[in-house]
Structure formats: C-alpha cells, structure tokens
Image: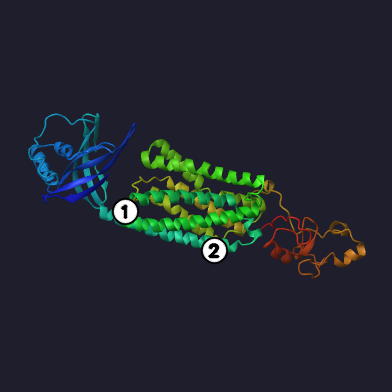
C-alpha cells in the first residue's frame, strides 16, 4: 500500500490518495485509493476502485461511514468542486459497480507507522481485516526515501568496485594462452546475471521520481559499465577459444552467432518472467521458480572449476577478483531476502544463507585450486589424463629424421633461448618435452606458454601445463 497525504481546508483532516495491491489465493487486484484522514483520532476512511475503473469525488464522499464524516467530507471536497456538493445528501442505497471501503486506524511505531485495517466490498463479496491484536506496518515517505537513496549509493559503490576488479582481471589475461584458461560459460552466466539486474533497476527507476530517479540512473550506469565489460571480456575469450564462432563470412560462423543469440534469449526470457511473477504475485510457484533461478545464476563459478580440472591449470583468475566478485554479487540476494527492512518489502527467508554458502563454497574451491592444484579434490583414480612435460628426453629418431651425427649436435639445444639443454642432469624439471617430442628448458617453455599454447618449432597445439 502506498499513501500520500495533502492538507485540506480543515487543518485536522488530510486528503489521502494512493494505491494498494491485494493478493490472496485466486484473488489479485490493484486498487486506486482516495479518502480522508482525521489527525485527532488517527482514523482514515478510503474509497477504492480497481485501477482500470473510474473514481469520482462523489463516490469518495458517499463512502463516509457516519453522517458527521459525510458532512465534513462534503465540505472539504466542495472547495475543490466549486460548491457543487452543498446540495448533495447522503444516499441510503449501496454504491454501483465493484468498489471497496477501507477503514483504517493509524498509530505510531518505532520504525515508522502501523495501522489496523478493514476492507469491505458488499457488491464484490470481499471482506479483509487485520487479525485481532495485529497490525500492518510501514515506513513514512521521508524514511523510505532515505532507505532508497542509501541503497542506490551502496549499489553504485559496489558496481564501481566490481568494474575495477574486472578491469584488473582483464589486464591479467591479455594473452591467448591466458584467455584460453578462462571459462566463457562463467562469463556468459555473469553477463546474463547483470542483464537481469539492469532490467530490475530500470523498472524501479521508472517507478520512482525525484532523487530516486537520479541515483537510480547513476546505479544503472554502473551496472551497464560492469555488463559491457563482461560482454567485451566474454567476446575476447570466446574468440580465442572458438575462432570460427564469430566469423559471419562462413556458414559455421553464422550458425555459431545464431546459437549465441538463441541461448541468450532462451535463458533471459524465462528469467524475466520468473522475476515478474515473483514481484507481482508472490505465489508459492513463483517463489520456487525464483529459488531455482537464483541457484542456477549463482552457479557461475562451476564452469570455471570444471575447466580448471580439465586443463589442470587454475592460476588465471585473480584471487581478489574471485573473492570480491562473490561478495558483490551476493549483496542483492542478501539484501532483499535477509534484510527485514528492504525497499521491496520482501519477507526474509533463512534459505538465502544456503545460497550464500553455496556460492562462497565455489569461490573457496577456486582459491584452493590455485594453491593446492586444480585436481586437489579429485581422487587419483578419477582424475582425467593430463600431459606431463617432465618426461624423459626423446630419442634421435623421435625428434627429427636427420642423421645421428648432426642430431647429436642440435637435439638438446633449446629452440627458444638457443642454449644447450643439460641432458645429463638427474632432475627432470630442468627440461621439458612436448608431445611433438621437442626439447626445451622448462623455464623457457613456461614463459612461452604464457603467450601461446603452440610449439615454437612445429606450431602444434600444446596442452596446458599442470599446476603443482
């Protein structure tokens, strides 16, 4: 319920207008309100009609419950109508059409206002009342304005921090080899998540005015900044991992682009519908759908964990990016589903902490993969086959078909630094052997693979080096 008060010609009475959304099983309607509020005893009498129906001042005056209130309302509204209500007498018949009478008694509360309410519609067969000893509570416009402003400021700061973290992560993975170790599925899920957030805040800004609109647009600008960075990063990573996916000049590229658009809207449209259904109805089904949507969207670290396991490498995501992004992304669900005084008036649920633990556990696994190795939690019998560069030196015939005398001279010379490779060393870590049987210094090949995952000699694709 939203109520606005305006002064009237009687200092003890205020003009009330606003709207209320009534929800119940099989019943969902939004009503437009108009009436009077008496300051002396806290009583309010409101007339309400469905939002698509016409409401007249005469209907509001007729809704007064007593003759004294009727005469007082007639006098107040007569000033607005230029004396056309002075001869109007109180009728005995019921109002025509589907209309509602709302009787309220306001009282003060530590955190705002509270009221007991009775909603009656004799011609619509509706009777709603607050239970005995209970009340509906809310906040004043001034306090709600402060809360909304504080929310937008916090959102702005968090989005700018997220943009800074993402920028640092992008700078840390500028080479082809580095971007090939970043999961484009993780980036795609985050881009969709920010699209949802952008849509929700755009709707909220259009619903508010004044300072809400100012801070709302600033927050949306921050969301757009983060979303555009994620899309740019996603495209760069995807082009490295699938060079033909964005080539519109061939059939495979066109199919790839079409697949990207289909997948994006296949995920976006059901999510937007779920969010709308949850906000509009708050039904049990919409709550379950929202829980499923949040669980799916906050699984964005799982593709990166799986890519680390497949490649045996987990050093491409910065730790500050992993931890900072997880905290920033959890702000919205924690605020709306754990804070009892959130600006959307959503009832808190303890299940939100399950989502928090689920998301932070993914971040913890990523951090541990960086220090303990990508396969630290996989049993040895279940680990995928990975190539080890710490192999024995190849024979003469394996690396080249040149003669043995000539090969002995050049076989153990590193093609990168052109310095000899110590073949007599007992430590296998001093040299590295590629799958194509070329020999390098271990450090030389490590630096090379930071730039490209291909053999410097024959240009064959090289598997990533396993962490640990």
Q: Find the distance from the CA under tag 1 to the CA under tag 2.
A: 36 Å
The label nearer to you, 1 versus 2, is 1
Name the residue carrying label 2.
Answer: 168
Of 136 and 218, nearer the camera is 218
Of 171 and 8, nearer the camera is 8
Q: Is residue 451 above or below residue 341?
A: below
Tell me if label 1 and label 2 are in contact, CB under 8 Å: no
Of 235 and 399, nearer the camera is 235
Residue at 62% across / 46% down in the picture?
254
**Chain-order first, disc 1 or disc 2:** 2
Considering the numbered disc 1 on the image, is that residue within a helix, a strand or a loop? loop
Q: Is residue 384 above or below residue 125?
A: below
Q: Is residue 376 visible?
A: no
What numbered label is drawn on residue 209?
Answer: 1
Give the quadrant of residue 57: top left
Give the quadrant of residue 24: top left
Of 265 and 323, nearer the camera is 265
Residue 158: x %, y % from top left: 44, 59
Residue at 11% across / 32% down in the picture?
91
Q: Is residue 369 visible?
A: yes
Give the quadrant of residue 120: top left
Crowdedness near tag 1: few (<14), some (14–19) or many (≥20) residues, C-alpha within 10 Å: few
């Amino acid at each position: 319920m939203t109520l606005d008060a305006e002064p009237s010609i009687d200092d003890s009475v205020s003009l009330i207008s606003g709207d209320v959304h009534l929800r119940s099983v099989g019943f969902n309607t939004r009503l437009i309100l108009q009436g009077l509020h008496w300051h002396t005893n806290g009583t309010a009498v409101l007339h309400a009609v469905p939002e698509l129906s016409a409401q007249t001042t005469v209907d509001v005056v007729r809704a007064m419950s007593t003759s004294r209130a009727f005469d007082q309302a007639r006098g107040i509204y007569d000033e607005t109508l230029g004396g056309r209500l002075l001869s109007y007498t109180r009728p005995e018949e019921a109002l025509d059409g589907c209309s509602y009478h709302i009787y309220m008694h306001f009282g003060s509360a530590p955190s705002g206002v509270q009221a007991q309410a009775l909603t009656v519609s004799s011609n619509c067969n509706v009777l709603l009342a607050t239970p005995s000893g209970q009340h509906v509570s809310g906040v004043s416009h001034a306090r709600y304005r402060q809360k909304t402003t504080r929310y937008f400021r916090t959102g702005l700061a968090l989005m700018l921090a997220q943009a800074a973290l993402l920028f640092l992560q992008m700078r840390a993975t500028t080479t082809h080899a580095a971007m090939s170790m970043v999961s484009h599925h993780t980036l795609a899920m985050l881009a969709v998540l920010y699209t949802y957030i952008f849509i929700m805040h755009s709707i909220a800004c259009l619903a508010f005015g004044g300072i809400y609109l100012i801070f709302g647009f600033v927050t949306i600008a921050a969301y757009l900044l983060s979303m555009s960075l994620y899309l740019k990063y996603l495209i760069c990573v995807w082009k490295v991992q699938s060079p033909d996916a964005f080539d519109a000049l061939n059939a495979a590229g066109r199919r790839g682009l079409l697949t990207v658009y289909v997948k994006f809207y296949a995920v976006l449209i059901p999510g937007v519908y779920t969010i709308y259904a949850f906000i509009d109805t708050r039904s049990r089904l919409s709550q379950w759908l929202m829980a499923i949507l949040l669980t799916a969207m906050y699984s964005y670290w799982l593709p990166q964990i799986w890519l680390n396991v497949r490649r045996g490498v987990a050093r491409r995501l910065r730790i500050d990016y992993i931890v900072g992004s997880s905290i920033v992304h959890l702000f919205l669900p924690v605020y709306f589903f754990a804070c009892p005084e959130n600006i959307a008036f959503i009832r808190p649920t303890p299940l939100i902490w399950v989502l928090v633990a689920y998301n932070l556990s993914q971040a913890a696994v990523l951090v541990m993969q960086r220090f303990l190795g990508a396969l630290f939690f996989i049993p040895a019998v279940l680990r995928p086959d990975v190539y080890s560069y710490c192999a024995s030196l190849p024979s003469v015939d394996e690396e080249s078909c040149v003669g043995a005398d000539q090969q002995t001279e050049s076989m153990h010379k590193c093609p990168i630094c052109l310095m000899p490779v110590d073949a007599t060393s007992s430590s296998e870590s001093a040299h590295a052997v590629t799958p194509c049987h070329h020999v390098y210094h271990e450090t030389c090949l490590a630096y090379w693979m930071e730039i490209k995952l291909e053999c410097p000699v024959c240009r064959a694709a090289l598997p990533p080096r396993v962490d640990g």
